[in-house]
Image (tube, coloured by chain):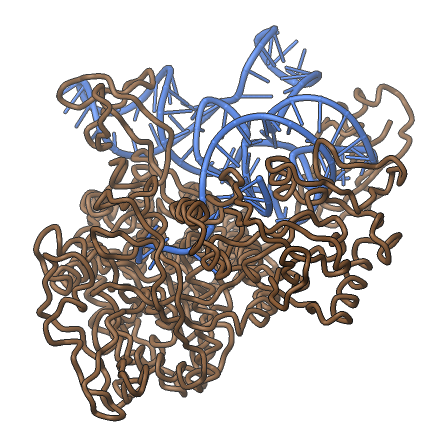
RNA sequence: GCCCCAGUGGUGGAAUUGGUAGACGCGGUAGACUCAAAAUCUACUAUCGGCAACGAUGUGGGGGUUCAAGUCCCUCCUGGGGCACCA
């Protein structure tokens, strides 16, 4: 035996190759028009300070793609950056008296070191950090360009306001109607905020989904629902004052103009201007509106809450019949942000309206007749009817199908000048104002005489001041003694700087483009570089960003195209959304969560606390989270087994789009497999022919081994292309098992083993790059595995010449037979019928029918 | 409430998309090596019956389509995700 090292030492090997790749700048990307490009990126992390298992999974998946595509000859761009603005830094500042910048940059440093230990094939020279002026100054330029293009505006909008902390809260920061930090009862307030006009691209964003054929169906569907296109009508109902029609009106939006003759009320949002006007003279209504404002703003909260209304006493005249008057309610389920903030209610054909009508004793008049119902007797009693049918009791609409009736009703409304047919989107404009310090300053100055004036491009960046304090509630930029006081860029009179900063989703909406020319100081994006690299060929990240981040980035791409920065509409041609990493969580007898490393599992499935031996309750496996302490620290795993083990485990077992249950035993199994590969090479490398030796005569074993080699190359390649990484790992394990049986004493087998080992190391390279690079060197190769080409399967060897065919009788498996590939159907039938077991199952009957699926199955119907 | 996804051995999961269910791994059992242990290697491991050959059952429940269903259709149950300021 020619053994050198009995055991594989990942610590030594991994840092060795990381240094080699780094020294040679192996992963540095440069535009090269002569080669096909491949841009792969993962969602960049928020620099919390620690890399968690979700990151390890995310970046392993992306790295496999990057390394695989590199080997396939693509000019690969695989960058990394930091989503570095955001609330946690400000919270840390308040809690620990650390400056957000210090906290953030320290975290970035720590996380970069941890990521680099993973051996990712990243071009670190293109690293972007969103909180750095070298990034956000370009973002401010984009904001100015978008303003110029008419994509930015200011309007009053409703927010959750914490009256103690003087801050705006996210919905999730409102717990039971109270602020999560202060515990104060949250108010709804109107604030003047900046908006980006994403709605002007609503139709295009919807249509674009159709071109994203390498996106998960699920994500496209979620975006489609989010944009929420619906056809309907805006209809004006004139106010009727004591029976007299006035010139004032209430405009409602409806998708069911066909049911207008079934109307029994009109309802306004509590935030509707008319509601506010009425509340001035009606204390009860004011109280009702205040009550509604305490409710959450989310759709889920609105729809599950009890439907409540307040009868204003106002009446409106029906559009089609001036003598028919409907009551006007203020209702808690009507959204100001959607449509016109007002609806008409048709209780007979809408769930919500039905519930409302029942509660307030409003008429329920059926106007849609279900196909099987009788027009004389049909009525809506127990539940509304929302299905198709013919219109009834509706004058000129009678007898029309629902869809025709909609068109006819809209035509009538338009003819009467009472409204028009419209396409309505659920999508709302994007409010980007945040009353926070740690974000990109919005480059605007407010002047009493000139209004909101953009900061001239030459004055960018608008830098965040360093000297801020967090001891007072509210926005530190607002509290700062001097920062906001500037002169107006237009008239030079004293003016006030905008103190709102950007939503952090803005930062992450264009970083994909910044990667193309990350070090260009003069402009957000170098157009030549962007035209070469964009769009991103493969984006990898969590499905939790399926809607907002991805939609905002798609909007930004369009807006950046409109302002000349890039040339594509769709930023991400391919998207892969990975599942979460989960783990069981544990509670001790006191009901406190405890860490997995403090838990000992017993043979009977129970668990006890390490040390005390006290019993522990095991709960189901769920997403790793600090609060439940069900976390496994990647650093610990990498210290024990190395990065390759962590990477291999992330790819084994679970398909990447599904949740992955972390198991120490599974990680141990991945580690054992690496040791096995090491020994396989280590124990045979001295007896292998060199790679250029001619092919000797092969015995059956060697021939079979070569077939396995080429079949495995073909299978693994196909699996990688389809993101079936777990399948690829399984094939590679089988492959290694097969190679272990070869005998190097035979020249043919030794040759097959050499070919097999070279291939094995190459195809596992993207998954466990350090070990593979080491084995590649030990196999005698002088160039880096990282620079070597992906192996090609010999198609003559990748298919078996003999196939095993299942023989069924009446659909039940009775035998398997071996036949030459592509044997004649008649030969297959004969062979099948010759089998003893098959004969017994037929029991002497004459087959009625024989179905032969070539190379797969024969079914005999007896 | 609305929209979407998933359910397969003791366990994570596989099944080239209608064609041999359980690949590969984890765990388990038995054995080899060892003074012993660790590590490693070999064999077996869906369930029930049988010494075996083999047979029956089996992909959350029920029904259907088909020569053939984990896969397609209907229906029910259970679990999970999303629903505009966490990132």
Chain letter matching colour brown: A
**Front residue (pair B19, A88):** A88
Q: Position of residue A340 (x, y in %)?
A: 56, 62
Residue A532 can be seen, yes or no: yes
Q: Position of residue A35 (x, y in %)?
A: 45, 81
Q: Is residue A350 above or below residue A531?
A: above
Residue A656 can be seen, yes or no: no
**Front residue (pair A412, A463):** A412
- Numbered label tally: 0
The hue of chain B in the figure is: blue
Q: Is residue A172 above or below residue A116?
A: above
Q: Position of residue A606 (x, y in %)?
A: 30, 18
In the shown orientation, is residue A69 left or right of residue A461?
Answer: right
**Front residue (pair A550, A761):** A550
In the shown orientation, is residue A367 left or right of residue A112?
Answer: right
User: Who's the residue at 74% across and 59% down the image?
Assistant: A322
């Amino acid at each position: 035996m020619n053994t050198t090292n009995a055991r594989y030492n990942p610590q030594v090997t991994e840092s060795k190759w990381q240094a080699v790749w780094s020294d040679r700048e192996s992963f540095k990307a440069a535009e090269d028009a002569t080669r096909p490009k491949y841009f792969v990126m993962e969602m960049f992390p928020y620099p919390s300070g620690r890399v968690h298992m979700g990151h390890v999974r995310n970046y392993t998946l992306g790295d496999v793609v990057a390394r695989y595509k590199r080997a396939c000859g693509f000019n690969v761009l695989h960058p990394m950056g930091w989503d570095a603005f955001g609330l946690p830094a400000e919270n840390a500042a308040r809690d620990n008296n650390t400056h957000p910048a210090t906290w953030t940059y320290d975290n970035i440093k720590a996380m970069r070191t941890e990521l680099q230990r993973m051996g990712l094939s990243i071009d670190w020279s293109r690293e972007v950090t969103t909180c750095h002026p070298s990034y956000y100054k370009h973002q401010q330029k984009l904001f100015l360009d978008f303003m110029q293009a008419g994509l930015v505006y200011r309007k009053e909008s409703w927010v959750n306001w914490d009256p103690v902390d003087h801050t705006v809260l996210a919905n999730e920061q409102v717990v039971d109607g109270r602020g999560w930090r202060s515990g104060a009862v949250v108010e709804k307030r109107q604030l003047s905020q900046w908006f980006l006009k994403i709605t002007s691209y609503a139709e295009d964003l919807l249509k674009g989904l159709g071109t994203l054929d390498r996106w998960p169906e699920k994500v496209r569907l979620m975006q489609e629902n989010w944009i929420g296109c619906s056809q309907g009508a805006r209809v004006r109902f004139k106010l009727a004052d004591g029976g007299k029609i006035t010139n004032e009106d209430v405009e409602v939006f409806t998708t069911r103009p066909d049911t207008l003759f079934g109307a029994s009320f009109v309802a306004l949002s509590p935030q509707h201007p008319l509601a506010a006007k009425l509340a001035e003279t009606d204390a009860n209504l004011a109280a009702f509106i205040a009550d509604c404002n305490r409710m959450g703003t989310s759709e889920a909260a609105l729809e599950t809450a009890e439907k409540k209304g307040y009868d204003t006493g106002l009446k409106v005249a029906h559009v089609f019949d001036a003598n028919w008057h409907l009551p006007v309610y203020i209702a808690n389920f009507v959204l100001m942000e959607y449509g016109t903030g007002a609806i008409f209610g048709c209780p007979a054909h809408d769930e919500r309206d039905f519930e409302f009508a029942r509660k307030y004793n409003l008429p329920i008049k059926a106007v849609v007749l279900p196909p099987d119902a009788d027009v004389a007797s049909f009525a809506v009693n127990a539940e509304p009817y929302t299905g198709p049918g013919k219109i009834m009791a509706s004058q000129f609409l009678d007898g029309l199908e629902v869809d025709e009736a909609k068109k006819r009703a809209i035509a009538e409304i338009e003819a009467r000048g009472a409204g028009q047919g419209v396409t309505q989107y659920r999508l709302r404009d994007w409010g980007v104002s945040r009353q926070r310090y740690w974000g990109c300053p919005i480059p605007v100055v407010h002047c009493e005489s000139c209004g909101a004036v953009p900061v001239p491009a030459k004055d960018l960046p608008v830098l965040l001041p360093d000297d801020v304090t967090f001891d007072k509630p509210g926005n530190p930029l607002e509290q700062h003694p001097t920062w906001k006081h500037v002169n107006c860029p237009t008239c030079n009179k004293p003016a006030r700087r905008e103190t709102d900063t950007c939503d952090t989703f803005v930062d992450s909406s264009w970083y994909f483009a910044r990667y193309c020319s990350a070090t260009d100081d003069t402009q957000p994006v170098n157009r030549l570089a962007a035209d070469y690299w964009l769009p991103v060929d493969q984006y990898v990240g969590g499905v939790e960003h399926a809607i907002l981040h991805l939609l905002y980035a798609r909007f930004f791409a369009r807006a950046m195209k409109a302002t000349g920065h890039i040339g594509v509409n769709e930023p991400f041609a391919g998207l892969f959304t990975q599942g979460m990493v989960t783990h069981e969580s544990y509670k001790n007898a006191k009901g406190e969560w405890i860490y997995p490393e403090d838990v000992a599992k017993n043979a009977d499935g129970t668990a006890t606390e390490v040390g005390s031996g006290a019993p522990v309750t095991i709960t189901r496996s769920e997403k790793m989270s600090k609060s439940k302490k069900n976390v496994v620290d990647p650093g610990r795993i990498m210290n024990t087994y190395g990065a390759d083990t962590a990477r291999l485990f992330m790819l084994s077992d679970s398909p990447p789009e599904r949740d992955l249950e972390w198991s120490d035993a599974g990680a141990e199994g991945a580690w054992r497999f690496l040791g096995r590969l090491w020994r396989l090479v280590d124990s045979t490398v001295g007896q292998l022919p060199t790679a250029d030796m001619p092919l000797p005569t092969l015995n059956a074993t060697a021939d079979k081994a070569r077939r396995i080699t080429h079949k495995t190359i073909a299978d693994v390649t196909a699996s990688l292309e389809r993101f079936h990484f777990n399948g690829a790992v399984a094939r590679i394990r089988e492959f290694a098992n097969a190679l272990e049986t070869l005998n190097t004493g035979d020249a043919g087998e030794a040759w097959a083993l050499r070919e097999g080992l070279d291939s094995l190391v190459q195809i596992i390279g993207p998954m466990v790059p350090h070990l593979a690079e080491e084995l590649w060197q030990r196999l005698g190769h002088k160039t880096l595995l990282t620079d070597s080409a992906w192996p090609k399967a010999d198609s003559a060897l990748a298919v078996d010449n003999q196939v095993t065919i299942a023989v069924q009788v009446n659909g039940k498996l009775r035998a398997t037979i071996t036949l030459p590939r592509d044997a004649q159907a008649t030969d297959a039938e004969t062979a099948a019928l010759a089998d003893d077991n098959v004969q017994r199952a037929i029991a002497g009957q004459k087959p009625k029918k024989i179905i032969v699926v070539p190379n797969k199955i024969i079914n005999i119907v007896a």
